[in-house]
Image (cartoon, rainbow, N blue to C red):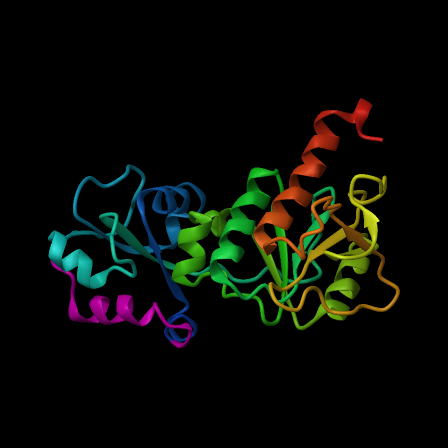
Amino acid sequence: MELSRANRALLRSLYTRHGRKKSGCCVVEGPRAVSELIAAAPGSIRFLVHTGDVPPGVDAPCIPVTESEFHELSGTIHGQGILAVAQSPAFVPAGEPADDPYLFALDRVADPGNFGTICRTARAAGLRELWITEGTADPYGDKALRSGLGSQFAMRIRFFSDLNALRQAADAIGYGPVWLTDPHTGTSLYAEPDLYRRSVVVIGSEGGGVADLAQAPRVTIPMPGNFESLNAAQAATIFLFESVRRRETPAISQ
């Protein structure tokens, strides 16, 4: 089987936001990301392109290509020999119930590498929901998917125009308050007992931080080194795994 001109053109278009929006598809590259896709959403795969062995569980056309052909198709300088074109999942409707103990949200986190890392970390911390606002990186862009190792396919992602809309949706399904993370001011995350109790924790953009939200409390990571701020993905990891620490060691969480 050879890669058709139509599929080749589709694949190349998926490295642009316009191409992904038009087709409703995305490209997932690398063994680990493709394996996550197969585990979470095997039925979404349209076709797979590879230079070596194919993981089990793929019920879609698997098209072998040469190393040089793969290099032309890959979105990276050093391709890993396997990629899949898949249907991008739809955003979860705002009003559907959620099961997570708290909600984790990203406000205009535009860097796809940071987005993917945060998505993967949220999944590792046991969450299934990830809420995002307008201005956040495309969850199904190739860079975000590579950074997230395909974890997006195992998460329920919800999209909102801004934090006001997000707060209204959270309140409607029984979550609140909304805590805004801040590198400079607010309650220490280690000292706030209610931080993860049916709440919403928001990480802000890399440059501007989180947007203002009336009457929303702020929470911060204490930094004895007096550094200006942490990378968004670093900060998200600290907040996510503080919740894990409290869950795993309740006797010393207070």
Q: Position of residue 109 (x, y in %)?
A: 59, 63
Q: In this picture, is 23 found above or below 99?
A: below
Magenta stretch in the rendered image:
2-18
Expressed as whole percent of the image width and height from the top left, the position of residue 222 reads 75, 45
Is the N terminus in the top left, top right, bottom left or bottom right quadrant? Answer: bottom left
Q: Residue at x 43, y 63 (%)?
A: 141
**Residue 240 falls left or right of residue 55:** right
Q: Is residue 52 visible?
A: yes
Q: Is residue 9 magenta?
A: yes
Drawn side of residue 224 relative to residue 1, left or right? right
Horizontal and vertical percent position of residue 34:
35, 46
Q: Tell me which residue sits at (61%, 71%) in the image.
A: 134
56 drawn magenta: no
Looking at this view, is 39 or 220 the one in front?
A: 220
Label count reads 0
Question: Which residue is at the front of the view, 223 or 3?
Answer: 223
Magenta stretch, main secondary structure class: helix
